[in-house]
Image: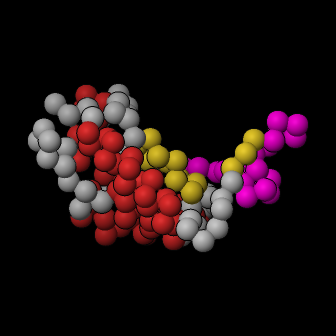
Amino acid sequence: MPGVIRLLALLLASAHGLHNATQRTFQIDYHHNRFLKDGQPFRYISGSIHYFRVPRFYWKDRLLKMKMVGLNAIQTYVAWTFHELQPGQYNFSGDHDVEHFIQLAHELGLLVILRPGPYICAEWDMGGLPA
């Protein structure tokens, strides 16, 4: 679990750096049955991409294609087995650089719905939990 805590701290620090100039808001307008993002009506249109199944070289290409088909948000799992191959040894570089993936999505104007787990899905070995 220390790896999960490190990842969340890294993402919070990253998000703070991305929005350092303006105060962002996200609310639910229950009276009008809608979301408000920065005070304006907002509907997110999301698709799924697993950065750990796509080589880093192709991340920008895939994210641009997702934006070009009309998505304004992407969602991704964080497969812990991808980052912690050996107990206590973490890899967040190269194809494992989830922070870069999130920053790239932000630069392209996409929101990120991050699903850090620890259990991510049934089709991934042990649901993404380290062996």
Q: Residue furthest right?
A: 31
> Can you give x and y, in whole percent of width and height, for residue 17 in the image?
48, 66
Residue drawn where x is 34% and y is 48% of the image: 7
Q: Nearer the viewer, residue 109 or 45?
A: 109
Q: Is residue 69 left or right of residue 117?
A: right
> Can you give x and y, in whole percent of width and height, for residue 110 in the image?
56, 61
Q: Which residues are magenta?
A: 29-48
Q: Nearer the viewer, residue 121 or 7?
A: 7
Residue 67's place in the image compared with 113, above or below, is below
Q: Nearer the viewer, residue 14 or 131?
A: 14
Residue drawn where x is 62% and y is 58% of the image: 72
Residue 12's place in the image compared with 67, above or below, is above
> Can you give x and y, in whole percent of width and height, for residue 56 in the image?
31, 65
Q: Is residue 113 left or right of residue 7?
A: right
Residue drawn where x is 73% and y is 58% of the image: 38
Coloring scheme of the render?
secondary structure
Q: Is residue 37 magenta?
A: yes
> Can you give x and y, in whole percent of width and height, for residue 131 in the image?
16, 30
Residue drawn where x is 31% and y is 69% of the image: 57
Residue 93, picture quadrant: bottom left
Q: How many marks?
A: 0
Q: Residue furthest left?
A: 86
Q: Nearer the viewer, residue 35 or 125?
A: 35
Q: The N terminus lies in which quarter of the figure?
A: top left
Q: Is residue 94 magenta?
A: no
Q: Is residue 119 left or right of residue 102?
A: left
User: Looking at the image, can residue 113 be seen?
Assistant: yes
Residue 86, picture quadrant: top left
